[in-house]
Image: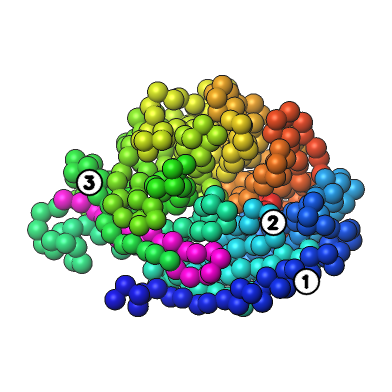
Amino acid sequence: MKHSFLKVIMCGGLCFAMVLTGCKKENTGGDGGPHDPDHDRWITIAGAKMGTTPGDGNGGTVVYAISKDNAKNPNFSVSVYDEGYAVKSNRTARLQSSEDGSTLFNIAYTGDNGGEFSRYNVRGGNSFVQEDVSVNISQYASTSPRWAKLFDNDKTGIAVNVANIVANNAPGGANPGGSFAYYRGVATVLSLDLQNVLISNYKQYEIPLAASEELEGHTIFRLDAPVLNRAGNKLIIGTWMRKYNIATGAVEENFTRLGTKSVVVDYPSLANPKVITSTVGYGDCSGYRSFNSFVGDDGNIYQATQRDPRGSHILRINENNEYDDTYVLSLDAALGVNDVYVDCWRYAGNGIAYVLYTHGGTSQGYVARVDLTAKTATKIEEITYDADLDFGQYQGILVSGDEVYIAVTPVGKDGNIYIINSQTGAVTKGARLINKAGNHYIGIF
């Protein structure tokens, strides 16, 4: 029975390898400049189109690839909206790239093709050649899956979902008409083989909290941002928590939050889900549309929080796969502001990370350099900030060696790529990103 659930669509791997080999030395870049993949990598820029409201990103996603030299050139400009390639997605695509930038991975989000995984060969400019391979995970993880690529040499993607949250004593629950005990949904954790393009494994189960927490109506509303530990034997998956009014069944918007929780499962089996809880953070740790947890050079996992009543924290999970509550890094305290909210962040190596954040309850975005070892954070002043700069849907901060690439564009306004040296902190203002009304750039890959 198990194999009947695995949807396998085989790819012509040999033919694809021949295509890559055949075009390698002939690639002229597509952006007007030479490109040698032996010594360079494509810089893919992604932009989200407006649907009905400026900045909603619901009009689809377009991409365009340029050379590193052009990315660093403030006299070079590009508009993905005029020149780019539209990737499959009814709304904002969920993009990831290979470590060398030669391949773009996408899972379409919502719509008729929601849940469909696609792989593109990046050839520069608007040349993204979709390979003749695909697999659809929607029957397991819905048409709106959350997923992330593991840092395992582009081998694996993990998609997660929680569906059908219901009280145990409600119709459809485990004990209809009985006494209330919990709200739970059915969680899916799915492993996607990115190279052979097939579902390699999946598990579905309910994930209980402590009985006392469930009796108050707390439950896991969403899973997201999985990360593989250094030992390679556990996945740590972020959660977004919700609380129901047990008398009315209504979702409570304001409630006393539990400590930040993650779900740990065995890898590669995806079995034996276990909930771990931080007493330092009280927010969610699901991120939104980007990575939210990273393995540091010291082997610990570092994780950001959102919707934290005490402001966002960077938490630490040790190599025993438990929260290390002796490690306290409050971004409010480190940055000297109130109500920090992490929209997106990325570990850059040697204990240094870059955080895109808001504070004070506004949506205006800022960028900070964070030293995870020293537990310090500094706003990057060399970046041009604007009241309409909103990183809420941001997906991709690129780390390439010591260089960190970030697209900084206010909604509906032009902006730039910024390149930051993670070791020296030096900031370079790069290529100009031409915008259109209501649109914004959401990542570099």
The residue closer to the viewer here, 154 or 241, is 154
Disc 3 residue type? Glu
Residue designated by label 2:
101
Q: Position of residue 93 (x, y in %)?
A: 59, 63
Q: Nearer the viewer, mark 2 or mark 3?
A: 2
Q: Is residue 95 above or below residue 266?
A: below
Q: Quadrant of residue 282?
A: top left
**Residue 166: % across, % down:** 25, 59
Give the residue type that dot 2 points to: Gly
Number of numbered labels in the structure image: 3
Quadrant (top left/top right/bottom left/bottom right) for the N terminus: bottom left
Query: Disc number at residue 100?
Result: none
> Would you call the spot at circle 2 few (<14 residues within 10 Å), some (14-19), or many (20 or more)?
many
Q: Residue at x 55, y 34 (%)?
A: 297
Identify which amino acid the numbered label 1 is placed on: Gly
> Is most of the magenta stretch helix, strand or loop?
strand
Q: Residue at x 62, y 35 (%)?
A: 349
Lower sequence index among marks 1 and 2:
1
Helix, strand, or loop for circle 1? helix
Marks 2 and 3, Cα distance to the nearest angstrom?
44 Å
Q: Quadrant of residue 35?
A: bottom right
Label 3: which secondary element: helix
In the shown orientation, is residue 126 left or right of residue 197? Answer: right
Q: Which residue is mark 3?
A: 214
Taking depth in this image into account, of 366 and 196 the one nearest to the observer is 196
**Closer to the eye: label 1 or 2:** 1
**Magenta residues, start to end:** 181-199
> Magenta stretch containing residue 190, yes or no?
yes
Q: Which residue is mark 1?
A: 22
Residue 73, image x, y percentages: 86, 46
Circles 1 and 2, Cβ within 8 Å, touching? The answer is no
